[in-house]
Image (tube, rainbow, N blue to C red):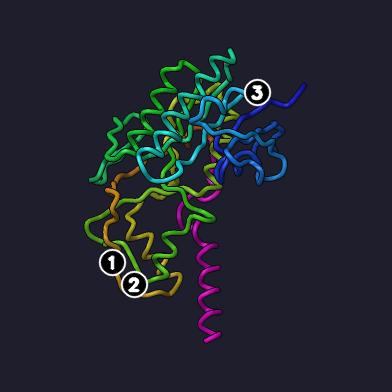
Amino acid sequence: MSAQEILIVGCGDIGSRTALNLIQQGYQVYGARRNPQNLPEGIKPVVLDVADPESWKPLQLKPDYIVYSVAAGGFSEEHYQKAYAEGMKQMLQWLKKLKHTPKHILFVSSTSVYGQTEGETVDETSLPQPSGFAGSVMLQAEETLRRSGLSHSCVRFSGIYGPGRDMLIRQVRQGRIAPEVPVKYTNRIHSDDCAGILAHLIGMAEQADSVYLATDKGSVPLFEVMSWMAELLEVTPTEVVESPTRRRTSKICDNRLLLSTGYEFIYPTYREGYREALLEVKAQMTAEADSV
C-alpha cells in the first residue's frame, strides 16, 4: 500500500516542522511555497504562490490531506487578504477544477478572531469578534472553507513562540517589562507543539471537530511571564513596555476541547517552553560580562 500524500500549503517554519513530523509517521509530504528550494530533506518541493490562480494550474497532485499554513508577507490588510482570503479561495477553486476531494483540510488560523479585551474566557463556542483586520481576514478565510462543504478543521493558534520567535526574551534582556496593571492576559504555544497538534489532528481527521482553539495550559498575565523571565535572567526591569500600535486583546483561551483529543503537550506552559532558550541567553550574557 502506497503512503498517503499530504500537501502543506505555505511550508514555512510551522509547515516544515509539521512535515518532518508526518514524514516520520510514514506520510509522503509535499511542501508548497514561492521559493521551496531550501526545504528540509525529505519534503518534496512545490513552487506555489497561493494568491495567483496561474500558479495553481500546473499542480496535478491529489493529496489525501491538506494543511494550509501560510504566512502573510507583511502586517497589512492587503498582505493578509492575499495570503488567507484570496489564497484559500484559489485553493478551493483548484480542488474543484481538479475534481478532487481530500479526506480532510487543516487551516492554520489564529486566536486573533477573538477580540475580547477584559480577560474573558473564550473557547470554540465563543462568538468571534475580531478587533482588527488580522482576525477579520482569518475569520473570512475560515468561513470560505466552511462554506466549501469539505471536511476540515480550523486550528486557532495563540501566540506562537520558539526558535526565531524571541521578541519577549529580547525585551526582558533590555530591561523592558509589561505593566502589572491593567492586567493583560497572554496565551502562548511553542512552535514544536503547533507541529505536534497538526500531525495529531491529521491522524484523527475522521473524528476531528471543525474548530480547535490551540494554546498551551498557561493563560496568564503577560506581566507574570516577563517577570519570571527577568528573574531567571537576573535582569532588573527598568522600563515598562508601552502598549504596541496594534490593539492588544486580553482573554483567557480554553484548550479543553483539544486536550480531549488526547494530545499531550511537549511544553505544557511557557516555563518549560522558554527555559532552555533563557538559559542560553543567560550564558551569553555572562560570557559578554566576563569579556569586558
The circle drawn on residue 97 is none
Q: Provide the major secondary structure of the magenta segment.
A: helix
Indicate the quadrant where residue 65 lies: top right
The circle drawn on residue 237 is 2
Of the pair 63 and 118, the residue shown nearer to us: 63
Who comes first in sequence, dot 3 or dot 1? Answer: 3
Residue 201 position in % (x across, y down): 55, 31
> Is there a contact, CB below 8 Å, between mark 3 and mark 2?
no
Q: Is residue 283 magenta?
A: yes
Q: Is residue 62 magenta?
A: no
* Residue that appears at 70% across and 31% down: 28
* Residue that appears at 34% across and 72% down: 237
Q: CA distance from mark 3 to mark 1?
A: 51 Å
Residue position marked by numbered label 3 in the rendering: 61
**In this view, 94 is above or below 248:** above
Does residue 256 appear in this view? no
Residue 86 position in % (x across, y down): 43, 28
Instruction: Please tell me how crowded label 1 is: few (under 14), some (14-19), or many (20+) other residues with Cα within 10 Å.
Output: few
> Is there a contact, CB below 8 Å, between mark 3 and mark 1?
no
Residue 154 position in % (x across, y down): 45, 30
* Residue that appears at 43% across and 59% down: 167
The magenta segment: 263-292
Which residue sits furthest top?
Answer: 99
Label 2 is placed on what type of residue? Answer: Pro
